[in-house]
Image (cartoon, rainbow, N blue to C red):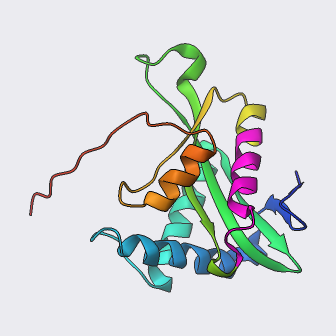
Amino acid sequence: MTEGTCAAPVIRDAGPQDAEALVDLIDQLNRHEATLCEDRRTGRDAARECLASLTARIARDGGAVLVCESSGRVSGLVAMAYAEDGPYVVTSLRRHALVTDLVVDQSARGVGIGRALLAEAEARARKAGRGRIMITALQANEAALRAYQAAGYGAYLLMLQKPLG
């Protein structure tokens, strides 16, 4: 297990003992995102399904779910899956990491936990030989976009949507 620090807390791989804390954090993220767009499901059942889907993706493609823990309490998570682009991308950047989720418990925000989790994800992606790391955010999530830009992330891809119903 690779460990790092975020202030006094420890960043570590998530384990089965963290399942309920992960569900809580994913539910917080889903509830926040539901205030920004209409398509987000909320509630613990939706969060459990998100966690199961994420775990399956990482088992299939590689990556990690990392948590920040302090005094026996999980206060944040970052989930990162490995991916590979097609031949239209230069070889050195095809194999990349994608941060699919980053959430810090409301009671623990503003002390650097999110930055520390991102830094550990970046270190692991680098160690795994990935040429770059990407992160997604809802366009309306201005706070997340500012935080990611402050951490050195820049715009790369714009995805547009059109409801068909």
Q: Residue at x 74, y 47 (%)?
A: 119
Q: Residue at x 89, y 80 (%)?
A: 71
Q: Position of residue 107 (x, y in %)?
A: 68, 81
Highlighted magenta segment, given as a residue range: 108-123
40 horizontally vs 137: left or right: left
Task: Specify the quadrant of the image occupied by residue 141.
Answer: bottom left
Q: Position of residue 41 (x, y in %)?
A: 37, 76
- Which residue occupies the foreground of this view, 105 or 86? 105
Q: Position of residue 5 (x, y in %)?
A: 87, 58
- Asked if one can make out residue 150 in the rendered structure from this viewpoint, the answer is yes
In the image, residue 98 above or below residue 18: above
Q: Main secondary structure of the magenta part?
A: helix
Label tally: 0
14 horizontally vs 31: left or right: right
Image quadrant where one finds the N terminus: bottom right
Image quadrant where one finds the C terminus: bottom left
Task: Specify the quadrant of the image occupied by residue 122.
Answer: top right
153 horizontally vs 119: left or right: left
Task: Specify the quadrant of the image occupied by residue 160.
Answer: top left
Q: Position of residue 129 (x, y in %)?
A: 72, 27
- Which residue occupies the foreground of this view, 147 or 104? 147
In the image, residue 92 above or below residue 157: above
Q: Residue at x 44, y 17 (%)?
A: 87
56 horizontally vs 120: left or right: left
